[in-house]
Amino acid sequence: MKHIMMALIVVWFSIAAPLKAQEDWRAVSSQRPHVILRVASTDNRRASGTILNVNDTQISIVNEYGEVARFQRGDVRIVEQLVGIPHAKRRGFLKGLAWGALAGIGLSLGPTMAGAEEGIPYVFAVAMGGGAAIGARRARRSAGWIIIYRK
């Protein structure tokens, strides 16, 4: 009996609570400026960009080209928020490249001090390439969209 009650509580909080929250406009109006949103209206107009202005009657979004899209609250069908790290793989690649360069310098110092300088560029290139590949592979999942309001 205890397990059934626990399962019912988990189901309630995982399904019913988010559905109720999705119908609440306060989830949209409480967003900070410069949060990236994607908005779709009932007449199939769509826009994505950063928040310019949100109040009880409308939402204004600025896209990357500087164009402003305004939606009345009654016309908004769905609002999604970008979560996660945009360009995570690129950032992981660059971090891995930097660590690979440091490792390449370290690996190159030994042969340089011993007087064998022929293979140093290859060692350096392999260390940088390996670091970049590992960094891109280990990067966290990039960004995704979550629904914060649905009519």
Image (cartoon, rainbow, N blue to C red):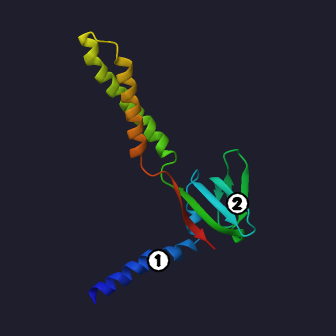
Q: Quadrant of the C terminus?
A: bottom right
Q: Position of residue 120 (x, y in %)?
A: 35, 18
Regarding residue 51, the answer to whether it shows in the image is no
**Which kind of residue does numbered mark 1 sit on?**
Ile
| Residues at discs 2 and 1 in contact (Cβ within 8 Å) | no
Q: Nearer the viewer, residue 59 or 95?
A: 95
Q: Position of residue 80 (x, y in %)?
A: 58, 62
Q: Residue at x 41, y 80 (%)?
A: 11
Q: Residue at x 42, y 49 (%)?
A: 140
* Real-space Cα separation, disc 2 to disc 1, in angstroms: 27 Å
Instruction: Please give left or right for residue 32 compared with residue 136 in the image.
Output: right
**Which kind of residue does numbered mark 2 sit on?**
Arg
Instruction: Please give left or right for residue 121 compared with residue 69 in the image.
Output: left
Q: Residues within 10 Å of mark 1 (few under 14, many from 20)?
A: few
- Reading the image, the residue beneath label 1 is 15
Q: Residue at x 43, y 80 (%)?
A: 12
Instruction: Please give left or right for residue 99 compared with residue 84 in the image.
Output: left
- Reading the image, the residue beneath label 2 is 46
